[in-house]
Image: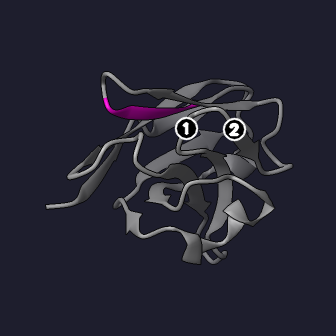
């Protein structure tokens, strides 16, 4: 059975840090491009970051560049999203998605991803 499990969310103060984990089952993180999306209440789901199938290319939304970092640990079959200098506007449910191979500009399109996790909540308090 194919499944994606996210973890690591929580409540953090402005300026704090969190690290989210994405662990798939039924496939490996080397099989697809892996992306993080987020969705705040009343807003559209938006792409945050992506790492390509070969792990060599990463991409970020402008809103998180310089603050977030995506990484892959193939032996542990895990993709992590390290988030620093968090802001209240980062509050959202964060989703991990897998599909395709690349992280070009269109990494922001939800249709590129076949598999989705259930999400983990991140709340940044001011």
Who's the residue at 50% across and 67% down the image? 113
Tell me, yes or no, whether the two marked residues, 1 and 2, touch with CB atoms within 8 Å: yes
Residue labelled with disc 2? 57
- Quarter of the image with the C terminus in it: top right
The region drawn magenta spans: 77-81
Tell whether position 109 is magenta: no
Label 2: few (<14), some (14–19) or many (≥20) C-alpha neighbours in 10 Å: few
Left-right relation of 75 to 65 = left
Number of marks in picture: 2
Say above or below: 70 vs 53: above
Q: Position of residue 2 (x, y in %)?
A: 21, 60
Secondary structure category for the residue under label 1:
loop
Which numbered marker is on residue 54? 1
Q: Please name whichever residue, 51 or 44, is drawn nearer the observer in this view of the structure.
A: 51
Name the quadrant containing residue 58.
Answer: top right
Secondary structure category for the residue under label 2:
loop
Label 1: few (<14), some (14–19) or many (≥20) C-alpha neighbours in 10 Å: some
Left-right relation of 98 to 55 = left
Whole-angstrom CA distance, mark 1 to mark 2, is 8 Å
Say above or below: 58 vs 111: above
Name the quadrant containing residue 117.
Answer: bottom left
Who's the residue at 42% across and 40% down the image? 30
Which numbered marker is on residue 23? none
Who's the residue at 44% across and 39% down the image? 9
Q: Position of residue 98 (x, y in %)?
A: 45, 57
Q: Position of residue 32 (x, y in %)?
A: 46, 52
Tell whether position 79 is magenta: yes
Chief secondary structure of the magenta span? strand
Left-right relation of 75 to 81 = left
- Which color scheme does this rendered protein use? one colour
Q: Position of residue 15 (x, y in %)?
A: 73, 26
Say above or below: 101 vs 28: below
């Amino acid at each position: 059975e194919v499944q994606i499990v996210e973890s690591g969310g929580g409540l953090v103060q402005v300026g704090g840090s969190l690290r989210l984990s994405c662990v798939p089952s039924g496939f490996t993180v080397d099989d697809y491009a892996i992306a993080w999306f987020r969705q705040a209440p009343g807003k559209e789901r938006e792409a945050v970051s992506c790492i390509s199938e070969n792990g060599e290319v990463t991409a970020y939304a402008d809103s998180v560049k310089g603050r977030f970092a995506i990484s892959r640990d193939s032996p542990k079959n895990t993709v992590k999203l390290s988030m620093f200098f968090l802001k209240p506007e980062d509050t959202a449910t964060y989703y991990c998605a897998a599909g395709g191979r690349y992280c070009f500009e269109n990494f922001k399109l939800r249709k590129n991803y076949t598999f989705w996790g259930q999400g983990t909540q991140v709340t940044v308090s001011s």
